Amino acid sequence: MSVIRIKQVKSRIKCPKDQKRTLDALGLRKLNHIVEHEATPSILGMVEKVKHLVVVEK
């Protein structure tokens, strides 16, 4: 599988609790933080849930 880089670009302050948990599960703790993950269906589903808060690079 390919590796994707996920960067948090918007704040989590006004987000619902489930979206905050999703960001935590992805390993994103603060603004402009970048993590790398394998492009599995579960990771892509989490990214889809918080797509308005993150940017994905291939």
Image (cartoon, helix red, strand yellow):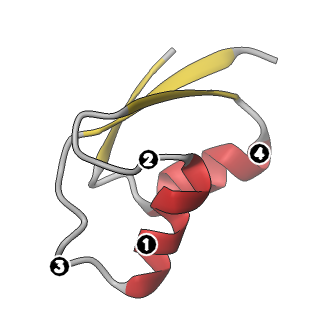
Q: Earlier in the sequence, mark 1 or mark 2?
A: 1
Helix, strand or loop at label 1? It is: helix
Helix, strand or loop at label 4? It is: helix
Helix, strand or loop at label 3? It is: loop
What's the residue type where badge 4 is placed? Pro
Q: Residue furthest front?
A: 29
Marks 4/2: CA–CA distance: 18 Å
Report whether 26 appears left or right of 29.
right
Between circles 3 and 4, the one closer to the viewer is: 3
Most foreground residue, 30 or 3: 30
Marks 3/4: CA–CA distance: 27 Å
Label 4: few (<14), some (14–19) or many (≥20) C-alpha neighbours in 10 Å: few
Q: Position of residue 9 (x, y in %)?
A: 21, 41
**Circle 2 sits on which residue?**
28
Q: Earlier in the sequence, mark 3 or mark 2?
A: 3
In the rendered structure, find residue 14 and report the number of the disc placed on it.
3
Q: Residue at x 78, y 37 (%)?
A: 40
Between circles 4 and 2, the one closer to the viewer is: 2
**Circle 4 sits on which residue?**
41
What's the residue type where badge 3 is placed? Lys
Between circles 1 and 2, the one closer to the viewer is: 2
Asked if the residue at tag 2 contacts the one at tag 3, i.e. Cβ–Cβ closer than 8 Å, the answer is no
